[in-house]
Image (cartoon, rainbow, N blue to C red):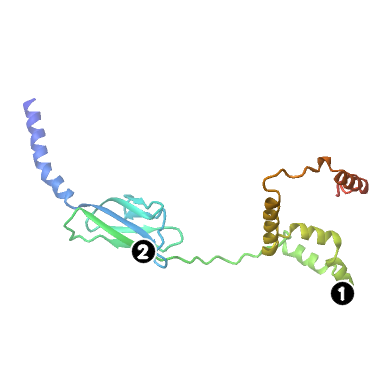
Amino acid sequence: MKKHLLYLLMGFILSTPLFSQNDENLIQFSGVVVSSDSITPISFATVLIKNTTHGTTSDYYGYFSFVANKGDTIVFSSIGYKKSEYAVPDTLTGKYYSLIHSMRKDTIQLETVEVYPWPTPSQFKDAFLNLNIPDDDLAIARKNLDPELMERQAREMPMTGSMNYRWQMQEKSSQLYYAGQYRPNNLLNPIAWAQFIQAWKRGDFKRKD
């Protein structure tokens, strides 16, 4: 029993200087990863010690912090940026080291993609050659001035700035006109009921397919 305790004590004494020597090389490595062109923080960039899986990722504001060794080579990588490296100085005397690391954007050239509304180029060629285009200016004008087409385009067309301003001014004037009093209720307005009955007879409320 005493021999086991003696061996354990001797092992602890011999290993203590070794651990202390390794701890002297450890530092708290912190910093911010930014873009080189705009100094914008790069969120969720990967920060790893080279040839290892030890490291971390930057947060939303580009900040990172982890334990590294003096002399380690740190690899920074992020989607849309070129991979870069930084060597931690091995002559540091303190336990903390901060860095602002900039990364350059990486331009990725994609291959040209041709989009066709037909499954195959041969079908597109056949449809293009058999396309019926009016050769008469009057026929083209009538097609462009089709009432249903113009009505659909008018419904889908957004309001311009002047139209929005006019609508807003009408709403403001209506609010000021009825300020401090109740708005009129057309439920008991005979003129409104007469207009409603006439519109009903004309078929204005019928469903248009």
> Given the current orientation, which residue lies at the most extreme front position?
180
Is residue 82 visible in the rendered structure shown here?
Answer: yes
Estimate the x, y position of residue 113 in percent, counting from the top left: 62, 64
- Judging by the rendered image, the residue that carries numbered circle 2 is 102
- Say above or below: 136 vs 148: below
**Residue 198 left/right relative to 100:** right
Viewer-side residue, 180 vs 209: 180
Q: Residues within 10 Å of mark 2 (few under 14, many from 20)?
A: some
Name the image quarter holding the N terminus.
Answer: top left
- For this view, does 103 lie left or right of residue 194? left
Q: Residue furthest toward the top?
A: 1
Residue 122 left/right relative to 46: right
Find residue 45 and report its horizontal and vertical position in percent.
Answer: 40, 55
Residue 82: x %, y % from top left: 41, 64
- Give left or right: position of 103 versus 91: right
Q: Eyeballing the image, is 31 above or below 183? A: below
Task: Find numbered disc 2 in the image and state the secondary structure of the residue it sits on.
Answer: strand
Q: Position of residue 9 (x, y in %)?
A: 8, 34
Q: Quadrant of residue 119?
A: bottom right
Residue appearing at x 72%, y 64% in the figure: 121
> What residue is shown with label 1?
137
| Disc 1 packing (10 Å; few <14; some 14–19; many ≥20) | few
